Amino acid sequence: MTRETKRTNCHYCGYCCAFVATVEDGRVVDLAPDPTRYPYDERILAGCRRWRMNLDALDGADRVNYPLRRVGERGANEWERVSWDEALDDIAARLRALADEHGPETLASAIGGPHASFWPLHRFMNLFGSPNNMGIGQICWNPRIWMDALTFGWTVEADIAPGVTECLFIWGTNPAQSDNSAFWRSILQFSKSDAALVVIDPRRTQVAAVADLWLPVRPGTDCTLALGLLHVIIEEDLVDRAFVDAWCHGFDELAEQVKPYTPAHVAEVCGVPADDIVRAARLFGQAGAAALVSGRGVDQVGANVAPTHRAICCLRAITGNVDKPGSCVLAESPDFVSEMELEMTDALAPEHRARCLNTPFTPLQCYDGYERARALTEKLGRTLPARYLTSALPHLVLRAMETGEPYPVRALIVNATNPLLTYGDTHRVFNALMGLDLLVVLDYYMTPTASIADYVLPAAGAIERPVLQVHGGVANMGYGGPAAVEPYYERRCDYDVFRGLGLRLGQEDAWPEETLADAFAAQLARTGMDWETFCELGIYWQPPAYAKHELPGVDGRPQGFATTTGKIELASEFLPTLGGARLPEPAAPITLCSPELVAEAERAGGAYLPMITGSRKQPYNASMYFNNPAFRAKSPHPVVEMSPATAERLGFAPGDRVEVRTDKGAARFILATATMRDDLLNVDYGWWHPEWEPGAPAFGGMWESNINCLTSCEPGEPLIGTWSYNAIDCVIYKVDDPLSWEEDS
Ligand SMILES: Nc1nc2c(c(=O)[nH]1)N[C@H]1C(S)=C(S)[C@@H](COP(=O)(O)OP(=O)(O)OC[C@H]3O[C@@H](n4cnc5c(=O)[nH]c(N)nc54)[C@H](O)[C@@H]3O)O[C@H]1N2
Ligand SMILES: Nc1nc2c(c(=O)[nH]1)N[C@H]1C(S)=C(S)[C@@H](COP(=O)(O)OP(=O)(O)OC[C@H]3O[C@@H](n4cnc5c(=O)[nH]c(N)nc54)[C@H](O)[C@@H]3O)O[C@H]1N2
Ligand code: SF4
Ligand SMILES: [Mo]
């Protein structure tokens, strides 16, 4: 028997904590935190409910361990085990035949949150000749990246520095549940200092509870709120004049634009007291340095997403909170090989780019918009990541599956996502996927999405594969480490799968590295750090410099910002060239309820209210970890929350069984009360029963309490295509029948 200790990493959240694994004969028998490597923090591990799952999950009875091929009807859950060669040969042959018939863009792909390295899939797609990668970026990350890049010439990050940052805005994000680690701890620490913490969230989250000021904004009205803050800052002359004169473009136009957004008007629209709006503006405007962090609350609001982010950028800029210590700093671009290069975006031939479904539907979120924006940021040597900013709109890919317009999409590769639970409009996603010629799912488990596939391919996970986490290539930071063991059974790293397909489809030259670890080593080589050193340290990082705009450019003058004008564009010169607005302006929220539905719900004693969906809650993550019995015992029910006053007004009580509905569909939950706005519902997302038989008819129970049965993926935002998971109207009423979850518990 061999017994050794190996470095490795957890991958149950973005922190990728370092572990030491005790390995006997190729099997992990113990795991312990590794205090010698980034990002070790005893308190984080003490507060983390997930890390111990790694050991059980490695050999979990519910893991998919071998390639499976469908033998029965699609969704019947009848499979045969096949070898990898058989699976990859057949998938490659079928993809080639489909591409011969319809063109390579007949293949689409789907990804989700940052669970895996997605560049191998994207390299494969680019070389295959398909631009049709669906991502979740439009509602998770892209709006921020796009608007930062077009306003400042690159992305910005909060530089929260104790003793320096005098004011911190936490806007539509709740790190207490979504990022239960270093960032949340730094906020807790911050809240105990003299500096001001302001939280903008319709719910009284744990962050709001420790804030100096909580603005319980009406969902979807954040753009108006930001314009109101700008109004006060300009009226009260809290503007950093020297910075604005030297570095901002379009201040007078912005000042004119925000004139109507008086505290009284904004209070009316946003449902927060006018005095608090003034107070928040003063705290931000008067601080020596102010930082701001935003999240999903302002990323997933359809048409409002771009103007809200633009207004937030303006707030940072006119107060001079750009690239100075303790404020918002422009990130650095990576010294290592960027995701864009790894994905081989430039290898996607012009004729295939021209088939991008987004063109001209969303003129920014497409190859043309990307290339134009990239030309700007490259003026200062920074390259925007391509795949996320060009990723195809699910609405358009689904339409091409449903109708064959403008060309048929007949095949889909799903990598590390569970679109039947997490993409908008589950009924539509289900019907489109059921009609495909080829559906390949790469996952750890037989998810509802996997259960309707032609092939389910077993993915190697944390501990079994190396990790290099790089923040999408917009920061000069990478962290992670090696695999402790070879993948168990016949699981494979996603790199091996896409390389295997690529080698079968004429991509031999594009996959020189035989393993993912070799590929990571090659990616890092440009920094001068070798893979072994990286694995010892667990991190490659260069801190961002300040005041980069003042550094001398090629002509010896300050280099400024990588925008059309070389300045921060309060008024955008770029967006109008794509039909967008020069200045931020709020848009109307979407409606998904017909008058008939509302009337029917009211007859049933129900109510018509806006909802927000998917507010993060430990211990689950999207559709994951429902297979953990301890988690299920502790959090057994999918929940809808309303304020106690609303429950009383509507005659609802905690524990009631309720149905929530839009014209798209319905889902059932257990009612709970929480401190939040009185005109609002907060609805869980991701719920299914991994312990149920997969496939038809129940598909893991995903029809019962799946909030995405009620959402739409139709784009609300015209440049990026963002749809809405927040600020959606719905109806709610009581039901009598027990929920399946009650039987479980
Ligand atoms: N436990 C857990 N952690 C996760 C995840 C998970 O599923 N579970 N998912 C991961 C992923 S993919 C992501 S993208 C991150 C997201 O991380 P966050 O952005 O921190 O997401 P949330 O914790 O849901 O916080 C969003 C907040 O926005 C508020 N909100 C909703 N609508 C509005 C609005 O219109 N305006 C304002 N101002 N606020 C609003 C909600 O009440 C909520 O408190 O979390 C990651 N971490
Ligand atoms: N209504 C509503 N919908 C939402 C949101 C919301 O707030 N409300 N949030 C949206 C956001 S921000 C996001 S990012 C998405 C998240 O959406 P997803 O990423 O689709 O959600 P997960 O449940 O995390 O699905 C991950 C799947 O990948 C598998 N997996 C995990 N790691 C790996 C790996 O390394 N390799 C492979 N091959 N498989 C792996 C897991 O087993 C799981 O089945 O949901 C979006 N959908
Ligand atoms: S789940 Fe996240 S915080 Fe917990 S051990 Fe894993 S990487 Fe670290
Ligand atoms: Mo996300």
Image (cartoon, helix red, strand yellow):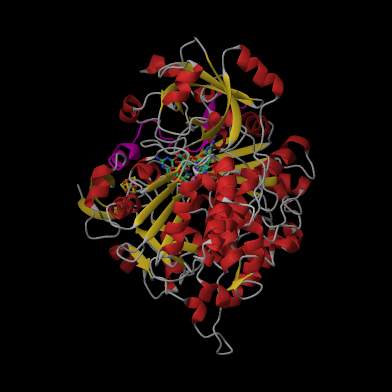
Percent across and percent down for residue 360 are 76, 54
**338 shown above or below 715:** below
Query: Residue 614: in sight, yes or no?
Result: yes
Q: Foreground residue, 246 or 99?
A: 246
Quadrant of the rendered image containing residue 695: top right
**392 shown above or below 705:** below
Percent across and percent down for residue 313 are 55, 61
Task: Write the residue at 46% across / 43% down.
Answer: 201
Residue 455 appears left or right of 688? right
Q: Name, please, the residue furthest toward the bottom.
A: 556
Quadrant of the rendered image containing residue 394: top right
**Is residue 126 rendered magenta in the image?**
no
Query: Residue 93: in sight, yes or no?
Result: no
**170 shown above or below 668:** below
Q: Count all numbered tags in the image, as a single digit.
A: 0
Q: Name, please, the residue furthest toward the right.
A: 406
Q: Foreground residue, 21 or 229?
A: 229
Q: Foreground residue, 486 or 639?
A: 639
**329 shown above or below 204:** below
Residue 474 appears left or right of 63? right
Percent across and percent down for residue 525 are 43, 72
Task: Write the residue at 53% across / 28% down.
Answer: 706
**Magenta stretch, main secondary structure class:** loop
Task: Write the residue at 62% across / 53% down.
Answer: 306
**Is residue 70 rendered magenta in the image?**
yes
Q: Name, please, the residue furthest toward the top.
A: 736
Q: On the rendered image, what quadrant is the C terminus found in?
A: top left
Task: Write the residue at 33% across / 30% down.
Answer: 631
Q: What stretch of residues is rendered in magenta?
A: 51-80
